[in-house]
Image (cartoon, rainbow, N blue to C red):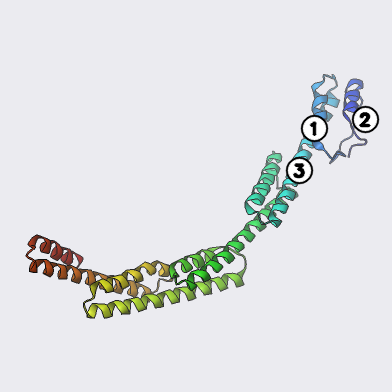
Amino acid sequence: CLSFVLHSEHVTHLLRTHSLCLRFACRYVWQDYSEAVQEFRAGLAEDTGDASLTEQLQHALQEAEAEASHVSARQKLMEGGKLFAETDFAGCFAEFEAGIAIEVAAQSDGGAPTLLETELREQLALAQLEQRRGQARAAARAADEWLQQGDYLQAVESLTVAASLDLEDPEFSTQLKGRLATAQAETASVVQDKLASSERMLKISAWDDARRALFTAMDLLPALQTAQTAATQQLGEKLRENLAYAEAASDDEQGEKHMREKSFESAAVSFKKGLDRN
C-alpha cells in the first residue's frame, strides 16, 4: 500500500522536488479512486524531467484506474442486488450486465475473470433462474384458470411454455410435465367427444352441426402436437376425413337443391366443389 496518504498538493510537491519516496503496492488508501485518478493525471501533466518518478506515477495511475473500475462494478453489484430483492428483473439484469462489462473492459490483458466479475455473473444467473421460475409458476396458475374456463388450447400452451423452461428444479419440472400430460389427456377426451358427436350428426345428415363439431375438435389439435402418438395421428386423420365427407355431402345437398330450382350453373359449382374435396 502507499506509505502515506497522497493528496494533490503532495503530488505537486513530489514532482517539483523529484522525491523518490513514493512506494506503490496492490491498492491505495483512497475511498474515492476517481480523485486519485485526477491527481495522478494532473501530476503527469507536469514536466518533471524525472523519468523514474514519471514511470511510478504512470503505474500508479493504471492501478488507480483499475481500482476505480472495480468500485463502479461493485456499485453495480449492490444496485443489482437491491433490484433483485424487489423482483425488478429487468433492472437487476441491466445492473449486473453493466458491472460485468466494466470488469471485462478493465481486464485489458484478457486474463482470467476477476472474483468480482465471477460474483456478478453468478448473481445474474441466479436472477435469471428466479425469473424463469416465476414465469413457470405464473404459467401454471394461468393454465388452471384456462382449464376452468374450458379453454384447453390456452391451458396446454401455458403449460408447454412452463415445462420447457430450464428451472434447475427436477421436482418442479416433473410436476409441470405431469400437469401438461393431464391437460393434453383432457383435451384429447374433448376431441374424441366432438368426433363422436360429429359422427352422430353425419348419420342423420346434419352436415352443418357435424362440421361445427369437427371444426371445434380440429382447433384443439395443436394442443396435442407435443404428444404426437400413433393414436393422436389417427385421431387427426379421422377428423379430417369426416370433415371432408361432411363438406362434400353438404355441397352435394346444395347442388341437388339448385337442380330442383333449375339453377343449373349454381348446381354445377356445388357438385364440382364436392368432387374436389374427395
The residue beneath circle 2 is 21
Q: Is residue 100 left or right of residue 258?
A: right
Element at badge 1?
A: helix
Element at badge 2?
A: loop
Q: Where is residue 173? Give x, y as percent.
A: 57, 69
Say which of 255 and 106 sits in front: 255
Q: Is residue 205 left or right of residue 238?
A: left
Q: Which mark is residue 37?
A: 1
Report how far apart the C-alphas of labels 3 and 2 lie in the structure. 27 Å
Q: Residue at x 43, y 71 (%)?
A: 227
Q: Where is residue 53? Give x, y as percent.
A: 86, 26
Q: As displayed, is residue 15 above or below residue 171?
A: above
Question: Counting residues from the N terminus, which is met first, the one under dot 1 or under dot 3?
Answer: 1
Report how far apart the C-alphas of labels 1 and 3 lie in the structure. 13 Å
Amino acid marked by disc 1: Val
Q: Residue at x 73, y 44 (%)?
A: 73
Q: Which mark is residue 70?
A: 3
Quadrant (top left/top right/bottom left/bottom right) for the N terminus:
top right
